[in-house]
Image (spheres, rainbow, N blue to C red):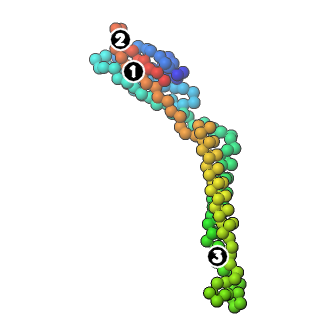
Amino acid sequence: SGAMVFGDGAIVGTTPFDQEIDAGEHRVEIKKEGYVDQATTVTVDPESPPAPLSIALVAASGPRSSSVLSPVGWALIGAGGTALLSGVALLALDGRPYRNACDGADVDAMGRCRYQYNTLGVGIAGLVAGVALAGTGVALVVVDRRRSGGGKKSATANLRLSPNPRGLTLSGRF
């Protein structure tokens, strides 16, 4: 409620309202602070049955919230991605021999080098930390968007043209 309703450029009331209008073509505008103004043209025919008219108001995009949640969230997502990739690289490296340390006496009868990378634990820790950091970052970004109204708000004004004993009535709720 509280949206201003204009008929043919003149204010006719605020929602909710009930107003008679003459037959013919009329420009109907709905205005509310914080929303994009909406307008439409309607033709009122006293011979026709009442017809609903819906006008959706969409929130105007304003300045973003000064919350620190979103920037911190994105930083955590970046750090989590880095930790995740590092964990994968360390897991891939685990069990491989050092490049320049597997000659002669350092290789056993089965061909295994005595000096191998032992990065399994660190790789798993990197994976776990990466998932935790990225997940926390995503949660912070989502919470910030919900708090700051990151999604578009919309409201619908349902207007109805209907005959009455003295002519037509334009009524509606917002």
In depth, the one of 120 and 53 nearer the eye is 120
How far apart, in angstroms, are the residues tagged by discs 2 and 3?
A: 87 Å
Above or below for 48 versus 132:
above
Callout 1 amino acid: Arg
Say whether marks 3 and 1 touch (CB < 8 Å): no
First along the sequence among labels 2 and 3? 3
**Picture quadrant of residue 170:** top left
| Residue 86 percent coordinates (x, y) | 65, 65
| Residue 72 percent coordinates (x, y) | 68, 49
Above or below for 33 versus 10:
below
Q: Which residue is mark 2?
A: 164
Secondary structure found at label 1: strand
Q: Which residue is mark 1?
A: 160
Callout 3 amino acid: Gly
Secondary structure found at label 3: loop
How far apart, in angstroms, are the residues tagged by discs 3 and 1?
A: 75 Å
